Image (cartoon, rainbow, N blue to C red):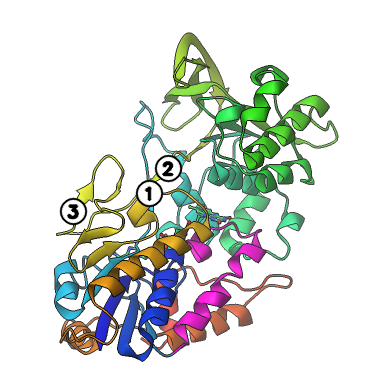
C-alpha cells in the first residue's frame, strides 16, 4: 500500500489524483487536502460566474472523489495546520497543487492607493472567495481601468460592463450583483503594453464583447500591423485578431451607453489621485526589434477611480519547499522538487494555460511517481491515520467530501431564481452548515 497527499483541490490536484488512482488502483490511498471545506480551486473562485458551462468540469472531479481510493480532506492549510515536512513523514509522496493565488505587483508609484486592486481580489469578490467578501471595490466613478491583455482582464472588464439581466443563469454572488447594480462605471479601459499581435486573449472571450447588451468595444484600426502579418499567427490567435479588426472596422455601437476601450501600446507609469486613485498616467510605447515595448516619452492620462491589475500571479511559499523567485512558483524539474515531493499545475509551471492544460501535468507527475515507487510496492508510511491523529491533537477540524455535499446542498437550496446556487462566502458559514 502507498500513501499519497495532494495539496490543493483545483484542476491540477484532481487530475493528479485521477492519474494516481488509475495507476495504483486499490494499492494506494490518495488524500486531496485543501485549506477550505469547499473543493475545486479556481473552478469555484476564478472561472467567471457567467461561464457556467466551464464549471461543469467539476462533475468529472466528483467522480474521482467518489471512486473509493481518493479522499477529500478539507479545512486543512498546509504551511500552518501541518507543515510540508510533516506531510512528507506521513506520505510516500506529497504533490503540491496549491495554484498561484497572489497577484503580481505593477511596481509603479500610486499602486497602493485605495481604488487599486489586483484581479485575484476582484475575481475573488464576485466569485465568493472568503478573503475578499469585504473588498467593496470602488464602483462610484464613471471610469475603470484594467491593466493586462489576457483573458482574466477580459473577465474583469466584462463583469463591469454587464447589466443585471445579463447575469441570469450565473452564480455571481449576491453582494457583487447588488454592488454592480448600483455601479456608475460607463467606461472600462483595457491597457496592454504591446499591440494586438501580442495579446493572450482567446476568440470566444473576445467575441462576447460584440454581444453585450449595454456595452460596446472601442478598438483603433491604427494599432494593427498590415493584414498580411496576421498570416504568421497561430490559428486561434489569428481568429482573435480578426475579431478585434472587426470591432475596429465597425466602430462602437452608439446605442450602447457603456464603452470598453482597448488601449494598446500603453505602459502605466504611475497612479495619481487625492487620497485615492483618480487617474492613470500612461506612456505610449512602440515595439522594438526584439518585440518588447519601448517607451516613446509621450505620456497621457486615463481617468479611473477603479484600477484592476491583471498582470499575472504567484504561488505563495511554503516553509521548507525550494522556491523559484523569478518564476513565482516552486523550484522544480519537470514537476519534481525533491525525492517524494512534487508540484503540479500553476504551482509547477506558473499561471498559464487553460483548465485542461493541468491534465497532462498531473498525469506526467503520476507517471514519475509510479516509476519511482511501482504499484504493489510498500512504503510503510502512516498515511491518513498519522495525519488525522496529528490534526486531532492540534484541534483542526478536517472535513470530508460528504461535508462539501452538505454545503453544496445548502447553497443550492438558497439559490435565487435563475441561479444555480447562492454561494456561502465566509469560512464560518461553511463550518456552521457542518455544525462545527
Ligand atoms: C480569474 C481566472 C479565470 C479563469 N478562467 C478560466 C477559463 O474560463 N477557462 C479555463 O480553461 N481556465 C481558466 N482559468 C485558468 C484555470 O483556472 C487554471 O488553469 C487552474 O485553476 C489551475 O489549477 P491549479 O489546480 O493549479 O490551481 P487552483 O485552481 O488555484 O487550485 C489550488 C487549490 O489549492 C488550495 N490551496 C492553496 N494553498 C493551500 C494550502 N496552503 N493548503 C491547502 N490547500 C491550499 C486552494 O484552496 C485551491 O483549492 C482561469 C484562471 C483565473 C485566475
Give the labeled residue for mark 2: 312
Residue 72 position, x and y percent, is 38, 81
Distance from mark 1 CB to nearest ligand 1 atom below 8 Å: no
Residue 303 position (above or below residue 222): below
Give the residue drawn at x 61%, y 70%: 56
Res 379 quadrant in image: bottom left
Q: Are marks 1 and 2 in contact (CB under 8 Å)?
A: yes
CA gap between label 3 and label 1 equals 15 Å
Question: Where the N terminus falls, by quadrant?
Answer: bottom left
Asked whether, in this view, residue 25 is left or right of residue 247, the answer is: left
Queried whether the magenta region covers residue 204, the answer comes back as: no
Q: Quadrant of the C terminus?
A: bottom left
SS state under label 3: loop
Ranked by sequence position, the earlier of labels 3 and 1 is 3
Q: Is residue 186 visible?
A: no
Q: Position of residue 329 (x, y in %)?
A: 30, 50
Q: Is residue 317 left or right of residue 132?
A: left
Amino acid at each position: 500500500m502507498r500513501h499519497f497527499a495532494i495539496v490543493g483541490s483545483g484542476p491540477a490536484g484532481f487530475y493528479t489524483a485521477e492519474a494516481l488512482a488509475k495507476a495504483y488502483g486499490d494499492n494506494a490511498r490518495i488524500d486531496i487536502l485543501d485549506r477550505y471545506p469547499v473543493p475545486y480551486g479556481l473552478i469555484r473562485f476564478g472561472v467567471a460566474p457567467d461561464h457556467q458551462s466551464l464549471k461543469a468540469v467539476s462533475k468529472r472531479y466528483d467522480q474521482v472523489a467518489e471512486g473509493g481510493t481518493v479522499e477529500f480532506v478539507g479545512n486543512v492549510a498546509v504551511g500552518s495546520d501541518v507543515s510540508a515536512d510533516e506531510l512528507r513523514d506521513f506520505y510516500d509522496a506529497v504533490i503540491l497543487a496549491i495554484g498561484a493565488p497572489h497577484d503580481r505587483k505593477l511596481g509603479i508609484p500610486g499602486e497602493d492607493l485605495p481604488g487599486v486592486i489586483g484581479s485575484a481580489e476582484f475575481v475573488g469578490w464576485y466569485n465568493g472567495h472568503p478573503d475578499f467578501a469585504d473588498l467593496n471595490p470602488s464602483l462610484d466613478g464613471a471610469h475603470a481601468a484594467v491593466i493586462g491583455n489576457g483573458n482574466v482582464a477580459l473577465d474583469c472588464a466584462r463583469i463591469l460592463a454587464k447589466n443585471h439581466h445579463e447575469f441570469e443563469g450565473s452564480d455571481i454572488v449576491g453582494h457583487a450583483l447588488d454592488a454592480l447594480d448600483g455601479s456608475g462605471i460607463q467606461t472600462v479601459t483595457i491597457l496592454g503594453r504591446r499591440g494586438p499581435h501580442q495579446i493572450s486573449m482567446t476568440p470566444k472571450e473576445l467575441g462576447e464583447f460584440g454581444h453585450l447588451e449595454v456595452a460596446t468595444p472601442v478598438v483603433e484600426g491604427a494599432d494593427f500591423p498590415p493584414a498580411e502579418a496576421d498570416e504568421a499567427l497561430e490559428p486561434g490567435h489569428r481568429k482573435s485578431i480578426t475579431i478585434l479588426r472587426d470591432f475596429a472596422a465597425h466602430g462602437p455601437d452608439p446605442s450602447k451607453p457603456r464603452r470598453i476601450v482597448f488601449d494598446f501600446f500603453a505602459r502605466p507609469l504611475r497612479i495619481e489621485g487625492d487620497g485615492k486613485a483618480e487617474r492613470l498616467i500612461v506612456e505610449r510605447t512602440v515595439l522594438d526589434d526584439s518585440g518588447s515595448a519601448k517607451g516613446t516619452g509621450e505620456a497621457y492620462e486615463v481617468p479611473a477611480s477603479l484600477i484592476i491589475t491583471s498582470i499575472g500571479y504567484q504561488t505563495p511559499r511554503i516553509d521548507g519547499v525550494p522556491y523559484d523567485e523569478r518564476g513565482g512558483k516552486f523550484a522544480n524539474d519537470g514537476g519534481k522538487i525533491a525525492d517524494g515531493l512534487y508540484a503540479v499545475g500553476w504551482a509547477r509551471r506558473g499561471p498559464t494555460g487553460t483548465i485542461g492544460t493541468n491534465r497532462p501535468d498531473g498525469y506526467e507527475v503520476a507517471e514519475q511517481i509510479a516509476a519511482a515507487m511501482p504499484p504493489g510496492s510498500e512504503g510503510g508510511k502512516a498515511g491518513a491515520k498519522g495525519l488525522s491523529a496529528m490534526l486531532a491533537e492540534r484541534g483542526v477540524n478536517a472535513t470530508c467530501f460528504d461535508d462539501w455535499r452538505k454545503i453544496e446542498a445548502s447553497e443550492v437550496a438558497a439559490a435565487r431564481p435563475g441561479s444555480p446556487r447562492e454561494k456561502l462566502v465566509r469560512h464560518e458559514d461553511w463550518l456552521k452548515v457542518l455544525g462545527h
